[in-house]
Image (spheres, rainbow, N blue to C red):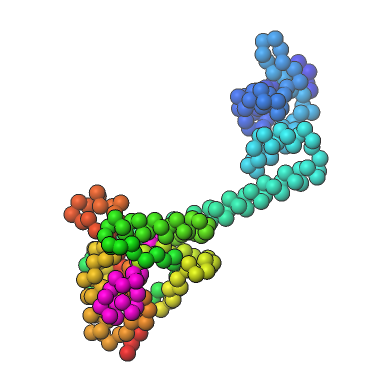
Amino acid sequence: MSDYMLSIGEMAKLHGISRQTLIYYDNIGLFRPVRTTENGYRFYDKQQIPYLREIRFLKSLGINLKDIHLHFNERSPQNELCLLENQRQHILRQISRLNTMCQYLTQRVDIYKEAISAKCPSEPFLRAIEARQAVFGEYIRPINKKNLHTTLMNVWKRLFEKKMTPLCGFGSIIKKEAAESGDFLEGAGSCVFVPVWEEGGKDIIEIPAGEYLCMYKYGMPYDTEHIAKLMACLKEKSYYLCGDIIDVCLLDTTFYRRNTKVEVDLCVLQAPVKKN
């Protein structure tokens, strides 16, 4: 065989790929040997090296073989620029999607870290909390566990329809006026938290930053004795309520089977307060 020819094994080794890869490239018409013997042995010209090198480079950028094949049929600097720019935009979209997924994971990790460390039931404690946003839906009546699930899914549906980004956190909102009147569930409902930069117009409820009187509890959002306890503590400590109470779910119904003794959610009540 000529010094200018390479066997399939030599060509594969030179480019750090397998013989099977070169056979596949041959079968799809992407990169074919200059000679194939009657016994099926494939041989390549050394002048083909730059072509295979470019194929491997483009593939390393994530460009699929179909697009590479089409590109080599009409290869030009302009076409290569278009191919690379399209792939760059595709990668940027992937980065954006991965960043969003990372936010989901971070939020969920923070929720479970708090759930694991929570001492429940707990005495109320103060915590500074940053500003948040949520999409809200009033409870379906009568308020029970099944209707609670339906209410929350209606909120999720609105998020999906508006292509808004949930932050993997949800809970309930108890209106300030209802908490102060003692009719705790009047106007109450479920909420799903969304990023503070999300724009949703009238669907968005602003939850301001501030100091919150918090309390861990096992119970459903409609179990009002926990709200009553928090309000009594608030009064005892000479605080006044300056906004809606947020009931953040830490562990929901999907964890019940892991703990047969508990068939209610682990949540943290958060009441925005100021000193009288």
* 231 lies left or right of 198: left
Residue 78 location (% of width, % of height): 80, 45
Position above or below: 238 against 45:
below
- Observer-nearest residue: 47 or 181? 181
The residue most toward the left is: 261
* 19 lies left or right of 269: right
Q: In which quarter of the image is the N terminus?
A: top right
Q: Residue at x 52, y 59 (%)?
A: 162
Position above or below: 53 against 132:
above
Q: Residue at x 27, y 62 (%)?
A: 142
Residue 220 location (% of width, % of height): 26, 63
Q: Give the range drawn in magenta.
A: 169-188
* 235 lies left or right of 79: left
Q: Residue at x 29, y 55 (%)?
A: 146
Q: Can see residue 53?
A: no
Q: Give the mark count.
A: 0
Q: Residue at x 71, y 49 (%)?
A: 85
Q: In which quarter of the image is residue 218?
A: bottom left
Q: Can see residue 154?
A: yes
The residue most toward the bottom is: 276
* 217 lies left or right of 274: left
Residue 266 location (% of width, % of height): 27, 61
180 part of magenta stretch = yes
- Observer-nearest residue: 34 or 4? 34
- Observer-nearest residue: 257 or 109? 257
223 part of magenta stretch = no
The residue most toward the top is: 38
